Amino acid sequence: MNRTECFYDKISSRMVGTVVFTVSLLLAVIGALILPVFGFFFALPLIILAGIFMLAPDSKACRLLSAKEEERGTA
């Protein structure tokens, strides 16, 4: 794995989180209109899932790669 793959891995995780968050907001709005109380209970797990994707740490391989580069002083 190289730095480019690590970069795209992070971007793809953030993009999935953004898409899930957008869908969960739409579900929350529709749920609020149809079932005012229960609509948010359906959207809440998706909002949490979006947060997990957006705040996901780097993979172990990317952390090792960045630590190796910092050790060499090329970061």
Image (cartoon, grey):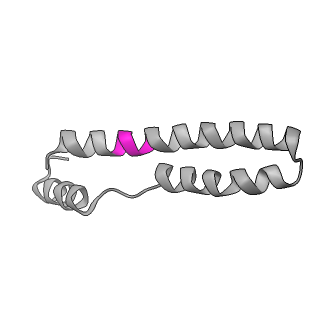
Magenta highlight: main SS: helix
Residue at image x 55%, y 50%? Answer: 50
Instruction: Please name whichever residue, 62 or 25, is drawn nearer the observer in this view of the structure.
Output: 25
Instruction: Please name whichever residue, 9 or 33, is drawn nearer the observer in this view of the structure.
Output: 33
Q: Name the quadrant containing residue 10.
A: top left
Is residue 43 found left or right of 72 in the rendered image? Answer: right
- Above or below, 15 relative to 73: above
The image shows a total of numbered marks equal to 0
Residue 62 image position (x, y, % from top left): 23, 55
Residue 11 belongs to magenta span: yes
Residue at image x 72%, y 54%? Answer: 42
Residue 67 image position (x, y, % from top left): 20, 60
Residue 71 image position (x, y, % from top left): 14, 60
> Which region of the structure is painted magenta?
10-14
Is residue 66 found left or right of 49 in the rendered image? Answer: left
Residue at image x 20%, y 47%? Answer: 75
